[in-house]
Image (tube, rainbow, N blue to C red):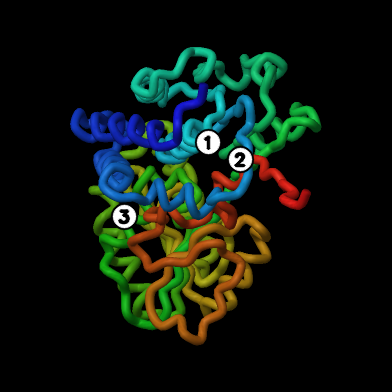
Amino acid sequence: MKQPLTERLVKVRAWIASCIGSGMQFSSDPATQQFCLSRLHLWCSTDLPEQKIERELGERNWRPPERLLLVISEKDPLGTLEGFLATYLIGSSMRIKARNSRVWLESLRQALGLSSDECQISDWQSHQQSDEQLLQGIDTVLLAGGEALIHHYRKITPAHIRLIELGPKISGMAILGHQLPPVDKILTDVCLFLQQVCSSPRFILLDDEQAAEQLYQQLQHVLDRLPRLAEEERITQLAKARELAMYQTLVPDWGKINYSESSGWGVTLSRHFTPELWLSKGFQLILSPVDISLSNVESRWPGRLQTLGYWGDISNFQYGGFTRYCSIGRMHDRSLLAPHDGFFILQSLVSFIDKDDYP
């Protein structure tokens, strides 16, 4: 028999409180780890979970999937946890693919009193997995990851299994006028999760030349003290930085680049919107009328825009195409009550029942 929702929430809060107290590791990056713990604190110290359930499910008639498969990129531990908790709270059994998150997922399963059948944690690598076995007994799949992941599950999933897709999204910043935000706010947005999640800004649009030059100088002075990237990422960055340095020599009006061999992060400043000439990790500053730049963004990634962080007067500014807008410094700080990529997770997982009340 399914536990009442209130009992499930009590168990979730108890586990989260134990994680905060013990310093459970969700990320090797100290800033990301602290951010994750601060977000978890909201679950324990507020009634936001109850508000979320009421807002998204309310008093309507609904039923959960019998067994839900979770395939969520572990670059975002909060996303993995959100999918797990959403599945648990609506009362579904689950199967979840996990490798880096296994330690705390198994701790969570134990704390919630879930059997190995109610919560199956699979650690297959994608190239070794049995698709047929993974999908056996599943009626809903929640996906969050890159294009290759989405295309694979579209190809292998039978028509009777519902796919809920959180595909790759693009986020960015827009700074209007000559007033710059504190550089630490920009660093927070870019460097949390090592710029690996959808809410991480990939570009910074500016329309004031003095502000663009000032920000470039500020950023190049902090590159060495940013979180050190993995060796493979630093090598990739170094190769791209050398390519751009050569390109700058050949095309002097393209812009300029600065790269830190110590941390692996870099910064570019250009007057052209050319993603092919961006570093994979770092700060891409584009000096151009912001409305023109955003038009290029929408043309380049139609339907894939997520968060736009802004600074300055936007009262007469058209910034369509994104599903979320916020001030710079809060790009990862999405409210628990807000939709994710334009829809509500709990609503998307359940099936609503139309009950005719007339005799």
User: Relative to 311, is 144 on the left or the right?
Assistant: right
* Nearest-to-viewer mark from 1 and 3: 1
Q: Which residue is mark 1?
A: 90
- Residue 177 seen in render: yes
Q: Residue furthest left?
A: 21
Q: Residue at x 41, y 56 (%)?
A: 335
Q: Residue at x 55, y 46 (%)?
A: 345
Q: Earlier in the sequence, mark 3 or mark 2?
A: 3
User: In terms of depth relative to the viewer, which is nearer, 71 or 264?
Assistant: 71
The label shown at residue 349 is 2
Amino acid at the residue labelled 1: Ile
Q: Earlier in the sequence, mark 1 or mark 3?
A: 1
Please, is residue 3 above or below residue 237 in the view? above
Q: Residue at x 49, y 23 (%)?
A: 98
Amino acid at the residue labelled 2: Leu
Q: Residue furthest bottom?
A: 316
Q: Earlier in the sequence, mark 1 or mark 2?
A: 1
Q: Are marks 3 and 2 in contact (CB under 8 Å)?
A: no
Q: Residue at x 45, y 39 (%)?
A: 82
Disc 1 versus disc 3: distance between alpha carbons?
A: 33 Å
Q: Which residue is mark 3?
A: 188
